[in-house]
Image (cartoon, rainbow, N blue to C red):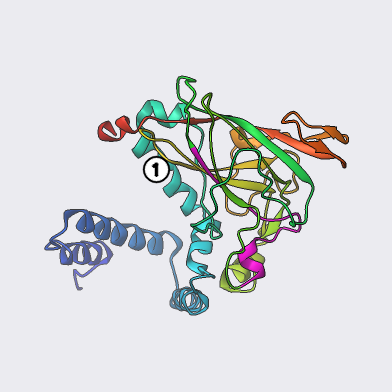
Amino acid sequence: MSDYNQDKLTADVVAAFAKTPDPRLREIMSALVKHLHAFAREVDLTPEEWLAGIRFMTATGQISTEKRPEFILLSDTLGLSMMIVSLAQARASGARGATEATEATVEGPFYWPGAPDLPLGTDIGEGVPGEPTLYLGRVTDCDGKPLAGALLDVWSGDGDGKYDVQLSDAPTMKARGRFRTDAEGRYWFWSIRPTYYPVPDDGPVGAMMRITNRNIYRPGHIHMQVSAPGHVMLTTHIFVGGSPYIDEDAVFGKRDSLVVDFDKHPPGKAVDGREMKAPYHSASFDFRLAPAALKAAA
């Protein structure tokens, strides 16, 4: 009987990568082979199932474009994107920063560089369907010290669950803007209260979600990229408390610490002095950034 058994097969494939010049690539490829082979053995993968998986991956690549990154969607819906985010935050922030800084979450496919720099108090929700909302809070370090001049790069979908890049060939910079905190680390701006929406489900990932009876929706949220000199940049969301699907985010990005009550107010003068003729919401949230100096020790 041949001694070319399953264990030897795995060992031979790992050995084939032994001369890889880059040690990190060698480590990754060796671990990948071991885990792939272990997966096939654990589930006793059949040739028919293996071919079905290959066809699925092929279809995922065929539908992918710059504006429709289906492989990123696959990573998101398998929770891999959030795992990478979690590992990256821990690596960059160190043990203390990773536990005391605001939790990071996925960037998502709708970020677009080049949002305008705007003065505090600007309404980036003008002309966008949705209920007016005042966002306010502070940016501090992990000890609560205000960070003056911290940058908040903000974007969200509209009240119908659509982003500007989904409605036109190029972003119209609707519900997008960049703000700098004041001397006390405070920020405030107006936008809309975002709503829940489905991830794209007309491709292979959507088919996977349906056949496994998975939810395809994300709860309402607004994206923030927060940065300050000497600190680790944070990419995160503020989630709308009570939003449908708040406890079953399709991409596993929701964190309890990021869920915020959107308080509803009658018409009148808002806390920033703006006179509101219709009801509006307010959402308050403070961001904590880890010191970048911890990166070297991570």
Towards the viewer: 54 or 146: 146
Residue 247 screen position, x and y as percent: 68, 43
- State left or right for residue 118 relative to residue 247: left
Question: In this rendering, is residue 183 above or below 194?
Answer: above
- State left or right for residue 284 relative to residue 113: right
- State left or right for residue 43 relative to residue 158: left
Q: Tell me where residue 255 sits by quadrant.
A: top right
Towards the viewer: 286 or 255: 286
> Is residue 277 rendered magenta in the image?
no
> Is residue 153 rendered magenta in the image?
yes
Residue 286 screen position, x and y as percent: 58, 29
Residue 98 visible in rendering: yes
Q: Amino acid at mark 1?
A: Leu
Q: Quadrant of the C terminus?
A: top left
Residue 285 visible in rendering: no
Residue 272 screen position, x and y as percent: 72, 31
Q: Residues within 10 Å of mark 1 (few under 14, many from 20)?
A: few
Question: In this rendering, is residue 56 above or below 38?
Answer: below
Residue 225 screen position, x and y as percent: 50, 44
- State left or right for residue 20 relative to residue 100: left
Bounds of the magenta segment: 151-168
Q: Tell me where residue 38 sits by quadrant.
A: bottom left
Kindly identify the residue that appears in the image at 58 percent across and 53 percent down: 251
Kindly identify the residue that appears in the image at 21 percent across and 70 percent down: 4
Kindly identify the residue that appears in the image at 22 percent across and 58 percent down: 25
Question: Which residue is under mark 1?
Answer: 87
